[in-house]
Image: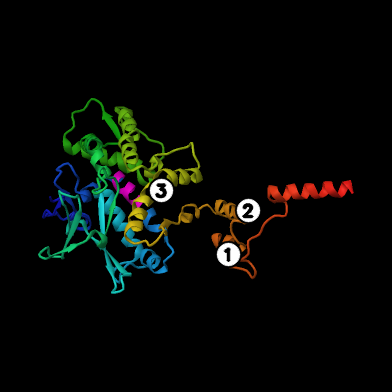
Amino acid sequence: MSIFKREKVEPDKETAFLDTVVSMTTDDSNTYVGARSLRNSDVYTAVKVIASDLASNPIEYTDKRLTKLLNKAPNDKMNAWSFKFALAVNMLLNGNSFARIYRNPSGQVSSLEFINNSRMTVKKDDTDDSLSYYVTDGDGRNSVELKPTEVLHFKSFTSDGLIGTSALYSLADEINIQNTGNKLLRSLFNRSVQGTGILKVGKSNLDAKSKNAIREKFEEANTGDNALRTIILDEDMEYSTLEVNSDVLKFVNSNSWTTQQVAKAFGIPSERLGVENDHTSSTQNNLLYLQNTLVYYFQTFTSELDMKLSSGDNMFTFNTDKLFSADYATVQDLAIKGLQGGLITINEGREKIGLEPVPNGDKLLTSLNYTTLDNLENYQNKNESESTE
């Protein structure tokens, strides 16, 4: 049973690059070819925000060789940021993204290669639901079969644990509504009168040449260096300004419903798409964004890495310090609290706020005012025994 099938796409000049970067179809005709959705500014922004955060926050693990592949360069052709960004973009737009795992003769991971969705075919065995992956070369002529252990398969949303579905699947109606609304606005502005004012000339029947002459003379006398000067009209002339229909302006300003639907589908705060929110601070927004959105997407990556690359009980995690690095006061406050609580050393705290290490700064500090309940009880008993003596 073929889950994904390759379909030759003849892109036009405007989408050639995007269709090369992201292209994938499935047996379900309702699933999007994601590259076209990047023409929608809300989808583009949502994908860019999430993919950028997934790519920018470093992945931590006990094996330094693997963290180097994931944070510096997965192979000799691509840096780690572009690698993770491309994986996230494909996952968000198409529901699935893939990377091939290369191992050396000793079984250690030597490199990771991003596989474009258009080159990947996934087949499922009807008897045991096992998956097989087939990767084609650049011209699509030759195909190589890969085992599931040789492929990182990231899924943004899945109903069966095997195949992913894009959030765009749920946005078909909303995006169509937004496109229709944008076309309506464009039509209103393209077909409506775009003049700034009306100059009436009474008791006259002017031909086109005379009207143009009067218009040019009036504009010459009242624009450019003469702008904002007193306007002088003949007795039979009357000038009035044109105003934009207030209903049209209200429609333009309130055209954010679909933006909120896109934000909801991707699970990101609407202010990340330009919708203002006066009720929370930037720090609160970052915290909510981390807890409600990024943790979910981080898990889609780390769970697959844990399954295919980790050993023993070791697990991959994302370092999210950069999400708060823009707010220096918050970073400094967290470092001081960690130092005072004995959780980090002086040099670890200095590193968080961008300062150089100092001698003897690698020891944990603790306060003399803190002790365990057992010590407090022993201290109390000792004082009582001394007082009775």
Q: Label 3 to label 2, Cα distance in Å?
A: 26 Å
Mark 3 vs 1, N-terminal side: 3
Residue at the limit of the structure toward the right, as seen here: 389
Is 358 located above or below residue 5 in the figure? below
Magenta span main SS = helix
Is 358 located above or below residue 234 in the figure? below
Magenta extent: 42-51
For label 1, the SS is: loop
Mark 2 vs 1, N-terminal side: 2
Residue 38 can be seen in this image: no
x%, y% of residue 236? 29, 27
Residue at the limit of the structure toward the bottom, as seen here: 105
Q: Amino acid at mark 2?
A: Gly
- Judging by the rendered image, the residue that carries numbered circle 2 is 341
- Judging by the rendered image, the residue that carries numbered circle 3 is 295
- Mark whose residue sits in front, 3 or 1: 3
- Judging by the rendered image, the residue that carries numbered circle 1 is 355
| Dots 3, 2 in contact, CB < 8 A | no
Residue at coordinates 29% horizontally, 45% vertically from top-left?
157
Give yes or no for residue 46 being in the magenta stretch.
yes
